[in-house]
Amino acid sequence: MSDFKAEGMVYVATVRSPIARGSVRAIRFPQLPTGYRSILPADIPGRNRIVSFGAEVPILAQDEVSYAGESVALVAGPDPVILEELVATTKVDCDEEEPCLAWESFSSDQVAAKRVAVVGDPDLAFSIASQVYAEVYTSGSIEHYYSEPQGAAAAYDYDKIAVWCATQWPYHVRDSVALALGCREEEVSVRPTRLGIHLDGKLWYPSLLACQAAVASIACGRPAKILLTREEDFRFSPKRARSSVSLRVALGPTGELSAMDVRIAVNVGAYGPLADEILSQAVLACTGIYSCPNLRVEGYAVTTNTPPMGAFGGLGASHSLFAIESHANRMAKALGEDPADWKSRNVLRKGSALLTGEPLKEEPPYDEIFKRLAAASDYRRKYAGYELVRKRRSGRSDGPLRGIGLAFAYQGAGPFLSGEASNSYTVEATLDKDLGLRILTSAAGGAGRVIDVWRRSAANIIGVDMESVTIATPDTDQVPDSGPNTLSRNVSVINRLVERACEAVQKRRFRDPLPITARSVYRVPKPIKWADGQVSGLPFDTAAWAGAVLELELDPWTLEPRPLGIWLCVDAGHVADPERAAAALRSSAVDALGTCIVERFEPAGGGEEATAAARAAYFSYGLLPLRALPPISVEFLEPGKRASVKGIGELPFDTLPAAFLSALSQAADTSFSSLPVSNARLLGSLGTS
Amino acid sequence: MRSSDVHFPKDLTEALAILHSQPGMLIFAGGTDILREQGGRGISLPEDVLYVRDLPELRRAGLTERFLEIGAAVTVSELLELGNAALPPLLSEAASGIGSSAIRNLATVGGNIACRSRFMDLWPALACLETLVELRDQGGSTWMNVNRFVSEDGSPAFPEGGLLTRVRVPIEHWDVYLVRKVGSSDYPTPETALFSFAARAEKGILVELRIAFAGELAIRSQPLEASIIGRSLPLSRRECAQFAESYRSLASSLSEGLALQFVALVGGAFDLLAR
Amino acid sequence: MTISFILNGEDVSAKTRSVDRLSDILRETFGLLGVRSDCRCGRCGRCLVFLDGRLVPSCIVPAFEARGREIITIEGYAQTEDYIDITEGFKDAGVVTCGFCDASKIMATAALLERTPRPSPEQILDQLSSAPCRCTDPEAIVKAVQAVAERRSKRLYHHAL
């Protein structure tokens, strides 16, 4: 998007609410030079709303504002630097109300979604439990730091409005712009630009910007482009939702997991798009890889007057997986057991009932994964050794401050993001006369390296070289709607659709003349049903399983954690290019490690102090320096005979934080329940002598 | 639209004359501190800017037996390229932790010292080394010890007026030293600081001890150092604990996090003298 | 003000304002889109250029600072044999990027090898921290830069003979 330019184009800048909650009385623009104009809600020809994953978000907030920084007007003109000055001198007069920022305890009108499930008889199980362990685990907001800040452009193209933006869901952009302009969907043509790394941060927000660009383009009669600065993007676009997972776990006489009482609160910010999905996934993952016969789980997606929060490397499971794995490690330690043994005794096996009651169809390869990890990392010996040092240590300088942590997770591919109007997603394949194979899918924009997985699958089925397989540019005029393109769906769902479309082509190949086109349609299966404390449905069709070991030591003086090694072992099913897949996992592991050590911030409310804090948070936010990285080892299990391709991109985020927390807790001989842990806290817990 | 008048003096004489005519103007060399927190499309600069990066008098570096002299517009990268033979290790370690290599190619030694919003990474090392800096104006020049750039409450107090032109670092031998950056961010924040320590012994007696710590606030106590100098080495555990405790009271103006880290590092430094 | 400087080997002039960043001038006035103007605080590395032979983040260089200087962007650097060494070396090592950070990684590598022909892994990782990106695989990047160093050394050795 940053490179997009069109003749006569105007830039668009955003006037934002200075308050977190209240109403807009008036917007007072400075004298606008010739060629510059303001755009207000009244200028929106259609509906001033985008509809997104169960929520409605205003394109330009009118009357009421719900977070500091919310767009209330636009200014358009030829020079972005002048626009910036004009916006800076625009006054937004508001009637301020007390913002709602609390979310760990909250009022009922803040609840955007609620999920409750009861399995078995948790009350009875708790009443006869041998031991009960309770803790609250919190996860903070994380910035996607994607490859490029968000933006969009729009222009008339003969009888259509053409829209350019980097988006994970081009058809959502199309439909949103059509709604905003009050025109038919066919009159909008979306031409996705390069997406790069997105970490699920460009699912719906690009649609909002696309609507703003389209409205500005119509109002000015020229091409219009809106491109957020990094700072604006950091402060106002969706970030990873914060969460609090309260776990109360009952163990039987031999330490077996007998019951869990879970309360999950996820802060979804204003409006709460994706609230349903994030909460559902968080709740479904609350028992992690374990078999739990008795469970009560209550989950709440809570709205607050902060920018809308959302997905980050997955849609909610990581919050719960972090909590349950950290808790499992803590309980094992309290029992004097190696966590590996406790996990092995309590892990799901084939046929175990998942939270929804459905039996697990495949045997999770926990034992094999652990065996590989233990061999590669020398986990057993190190864990025992570090435990001994921990227990015997009398002072900070008494032996090395080291720890090692172990965590497991799964990444399921299933009926997620099923709350949208369109319930079927399509991929098309065309074999041309010259035996070139074209794959048409709207998911191509964000697929990155996964595109080669599709091409390889397609080439194998049709029996042509990979070079003969092209993926069509995902313009909505050209390709069918393949649904939202997330980290997990690309490899699993889309790949399967590509395969099926190619199989259909291959069936007709020697029967029908070329060119042959075939479509493969994925009808979103019945979603998970939540009713009266019961949840039913299949949480995932297939799952990729993974384990992670992380070893660290603390600087002897400042107690800064220094990772010494990371080992990942993944059951990824069929891996077409193991080197590339390993490289992808390593770079995700680096990102996950960053969230454990440096990456975290608190989204702000309104007012001068909050704004200053938000700006300071932006400037100081950064990725983990490469020199701080340990060696990262990745191993894949050999696939079974009928193994499918599985999505694995979320797994480092699902495993490494818990492994890190446990390692840190061991090294510091203190139980922590949230990351990052400041050096101050470490020093406070360990003392300075 | 706002715009600035940027002056490009060709030499120091011209620069000082311009500065004399407009005392409050912004002095711009590398600009890394000025521009590190302006994330908007346009750059915001005051009405008048004096660009000193190319002044030949500010770009020199030279080594004598007694000191290393560096022009204020020498970049941090250029400083590091002087090499271990010329650069005291305390200074080299402090400089190599600054930003990224690209930032170090822009950031200047003078800009790092003259920062008024906080102490940047070179100050603690330079303070330990009792570095002198030259401030010049049309009336003449003054040499000041960098330790004077701290106000009573520990906040930065780089003097107004005048142009920082040269930095003179005494060349001394140190038996023990420690430089440690504090805070997990590469970027200067309220929770980042640099700890610097150096000590020298002669015939088993501690003859010189310097400890400086600075982020948004600075800590250095020459009286406390003087009270420790003269002890026999190695220090006993009791002495180490006693001295670390004395430093604890100096840390009361720091945040809890920084105070804890400062005291831990002081303890670590004294540990080195106990071995 | 009008500033004159050497851009990718050519003498050029540009009308600039004191508020303009060098990265924006390079992009808007000269159409050099390989230079990005992203974070605007010198940290993301997407705007790296050589300024008088030194790698700098051009987004925190006021345009007026280019006066009389020599600037090389990725477009100019791409005309060199060193560039081919780097791109081929990255390709041989299987480095896959997100498509946005290539220029910054190339420029950072170029600057490193100019001063340190045989960098250690620590030096490589330190230098590549000037071009942070979520797509970076640290193992691959170390291997890649080492491969580039090897290629470059061989080429320079053959030239010298």
Image (spheres, coloured by chain):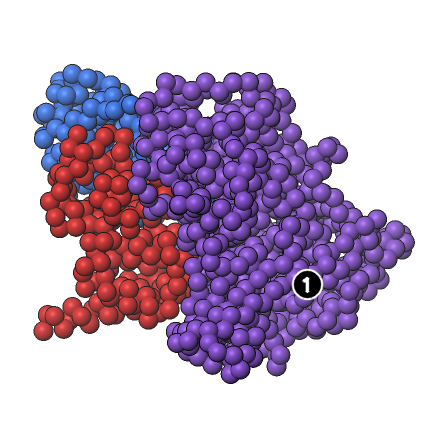
Chain colours: A purple, B blue, C red
A338, above or below B31, in the image: below
Task: State left or right for residue B255 relative to residue A21.
Answer: left
Task: State left or right for residue B211 relative to residue B253.
Answer: left
Task: Name the residue furthest top.
Answer: B21
- Residue found at x 65% / y 44%: A54
Q: Chain of mark 1?
A: A
Front residue of A522/A494: it is A522
Q: Secondary structure at mark 1?
A: loop
A440, above or below A106, in the image: below
- Residue type of the residue flagged with mark 1: Phe
Neighbor class of circle 1 (other Cα within 10 Å; few <14, some 14-19, many 20+) is: some
Task: State left or right for residue A21 relative to residue B249.
Answer: right
Residue C34: x, y in percent? 29, 51
Task: State left or right for residue A16 relative to residue A314.
Answer: left
Front residue of A205/C85: it is A205
- Identify the residue position indicated by label 1 in the image: A540
Residue B219: x, y in percent? 40, 31
- The number of numbered discs placed on residues in the rendered structure image is 1
